[in-house]
Image (cartoon, rainbow, N blue to C red):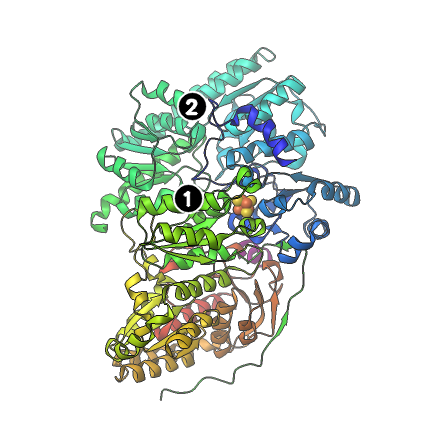
Amino acid sequence: MITANMDKLMQSGCEPGGTEKVCRSRGGESCAFDGAMIVLQPIADAAHLVHGPIVCCGNSWEGRGTLSTRGNLHRRGFTTDMGEMDIVYGSETKLLNAIHKTHEKVRPKAIFVYATCVSGLIGEDIAAVCRKAETELGIRVIPVNAPGFVGPKNLGNRIAGETLLQYVIGTGEPPETTDADINLIGEYNIAGDLWNIEPVLRDAGLRVLSRITGNATFEEITWAHRARLNVVVCSRALINVAKEMEIRYGIPYVEVSFFGKTEMAKALRSISEVLKGQNAAIGESTEQCIEREEKNLTERLASYGHLRGKKAVLYTGGVKSWSFITALMDLGIEIAAVGTKKSSHEDEAKMREILGPDAPLVEDVTPKNLLKLLRESDADMLVAGGRNKYLAAKEGYPFIDVNQERHSAYAGYSGLITMAEDLSSSIRFYERNRALSDRKGRIGNRAPAPTVVAPRADLCMDPIKHSPALGAAIALQGMDRAIPILHGAQGCTFLGKVLITNHFREPISLLSSKLFVEDVVMGSEERLITAASAAVEKNSPDIVGILTTGLSEVKGDDVAAAVGTLQKAHPDTLFVQVSTPDFTGGMERGYASAVEAIVQTMVPAGQRAAARTARCVTKAIVIFAGMHLTPGDVNELKSMVESFGLRPILVPDLGALDGSRAGVSALALGGTTREELAELPDSVFSLVIGASLEPAARILEDRFAIGYRVFHGLSDLEECDALLDLLSLLGNQPIPLRYVRERKSLIDGMRDAHGYFGGRTIGIALEPDHAVALSRLLSDMGAVTVRAVVPEQTSACLDIEAAEVVVGDLTDLPHRCDLFVASAHAEMIAAERHIPLLQAGFPLHKTLGAATKVSVGYRGTLSRIYEIGTLLMGAH
Ligand code: SF4
């Protein structure tokens, strides 16, 4: 069924040998599911329910920069969070219940239900469930059949377009029509682009009847068939909608771009050219509008003359690739090179038209080559997508993000001014900063173990859960010269990489075996071997982590055999297999599984005899650092251990992500080295920060009799004291004066702040280990954690010092309390409930400096107390 529908879409421009190259990309971008969501999610008065394991919703939620004034459902995450039992027994009933729950909770105008790799693979009849729900609820419930493995993002865009044609367009009537009515197709109101364009269109005498889909209501799309003209904006991917509407409803279409002065004028003229036949005034009002806007623009751009003659390397996709060329040229910027990997042949032809036959078009846009281009062309700036931001930052190049994750609106005349300002400010920044380059005692008794409530919900709304593969991929970022490879469709990797990159604000290593329909139907072990072999041959990694996904696990791939083959073929690289099916557990579990697999694979029991003799000399201490520690925390811990004459070996060493990662590489650089791992049997003790990592320490204990101690987070006085005592014993050295002073300072700060904490009520939503660590601190300070929400039940839940622990999602946070502590995703819920939010956990893409924040040790604990105390003070 899926493949039959795909054939139809492939015929209209996606065929591999076709000239349009719409769907040629088989890497470096997201999956069809994500592509479909990009198109449909901007309909903000409709709910968007993802039927699959947590990975699809978790990795993509809030990853798109679309804005809306017509609702806020595009900012919420809805998923069925399929688990193992759902896959074994089917989950159509669960899906139906989830649709009902969604309706009950947010009363949407319609519900779009998205198939994903796992629900697609096991053959869930989503269309039938949607039909049933539609009858029962009396609202539109629309299936979107674009599981990730059918193809890349662009194909998903087209499937979404087909979905609108099939289920939405032509099903309603507008209150009135005019002869100046146009539809905007493929404009998603990224960062508010539309709000720059619509006033100009109005000025030119035009009326936007339907927005497809930025800032749209569901209803206005139902009457799109009454427009006089379809204006396809920067999106070859939705051209199928315009073509089909021409056939069905006789509506002509024009293709335009709204980026830059030249393209704005062209766009307005091509629209008026079609409409002035019916409304002569449009021709005149358009010309007057262009004249007015250009005059105004010239005046406002006068102060950006310093951009003239600067050189830019541009790398973006589709129509943007050529329209940004003209926009940059409008500012007097020269084009040093343009990356074309994501552009169609037609886009390339347009680039040549603008830049001439010697246009500097470059297909290879790996970070290494982009850097080479920047250097060789002596470019002044990089204009590209967010994923290249850290390449620019590392190398000190001014940068603006022009892709869908951007935060600035660059469309329209005023967008060009914003672009000039953003470029100027980035240039200014680099010009200014050329050098850039009685000790015991806890406060009270620990609270008794809380009640853990784990309701089995059919709908997971605004999840805190992330996929285990994401956790494993993060763990591998802390291993030097490692490459994690996700064995699944490419969407998980793309979305996961963006999410991790934005959290750490560092270049991230993550590859995919890129499974497509043919691999899903046939076997895919060969695909994994080919992808991993290519990665090894190209990058010579020390470690390759093979992480499974829901798709490869449900298919039943023999990953162990593939890893065996790889190990034989590439003996110099160590392959670590980590089982991380999306439907079992969450991120913390995936992280712990990766650490365990690393120790299991890389520290064989045979080294035991040698270990015992060497141990006393090296005084190496293993630190199993939990996922809740920031790179800043990890580095603080290292220096604490070192100050006792001990040598810390971090597993993994995420301190490498503190901003010091240099160079451009597909490898994770700067973490734990293979040589350090080989030394583990010689270590004297293991410190475990986070109970989830205890199994890894147990391996060392079993194999080499290395003792260990578990700490929850080292972010309260009692644990800090215990650590320093232990280090003093292991290093046979007194506690350095520095810590004696820091401890005094912590105690003083606790005294100062406790008045703001006493009796205050807190709701937290974090991974279990993190929740334990934070709740202990809050409890020490006299605050009450009224509810802790965790994504999954683990043994650590019993150590959380809260009145109640709920396995749930962000919506389970209490409705009344004095403070929330949760990830950036909780921003909207916190605002809705008028409760201040301390952003912690994952992801933290809306705060700066999250990676370098320190909340371990005396100093770190004090900073955290001040941070929370200040928020509570404000809420008094
Ligand atoms: S590729 Fe990954 S994100 Fe995309 S649908 Fe498949 S499982 Fe979901």
Residue 469, percent across and down? 49, 55
Secondary element at image label 1: helix
Secondary element at image label 2: helix
Ligand 1 appears in which quadrant? top right
Q: Residue 500: tell me if it is visible.
A: no
Work out which residue is located at the far bottom of the displayed protein and give it: 438
Residue 349 versus residue 603 in the image, above or below: above
Q: Which residue is mark 1?
A: 531
Residue at 53% in and 72% down = 796
Res 123 quadrant in image: top right
Q: Is residue 785 left or right of residue 597?
A: right
Residue at 39% in and 57% down = 476
Residue 379, percent across and down? 25, 34
Pointer 1 local density, CA inside 10 Å: few below 14, some 14–19, many at least 20: some
Res 303 quadrant in image: top left
Amino acid type shown at disc 2: His
Q: Which residue is mark 2?
A: 345
Comparing 844 with 628, the one in front is 628
Q: Does the stretch in magenta take in 829?
A: yes
Q: Give the label, 1 or 2, closer to the camera.
A: 1
Q: Is residue 871 left or right of residue 144?
A: left
Residue at 49% in and 52% down = 559
Comparing 134 with 406, the one in front is 134
- Upstream in the sequence, badge 1 or badge 2? 2
Residue 430, percent across and down? 25, 44
* Cα–Cα gap, marks 1 and 2: 26 Å
What range is drawn magenta here? Answer: 826-834
Q: Residue 464: tell me if it is visible.
A: yes
Amino acid type shown at disc 1: Ala
Labels 1 & 2 near each other (Cβ < 8 A): no
Residue 581 versus residue 223 in the image, above or below: below
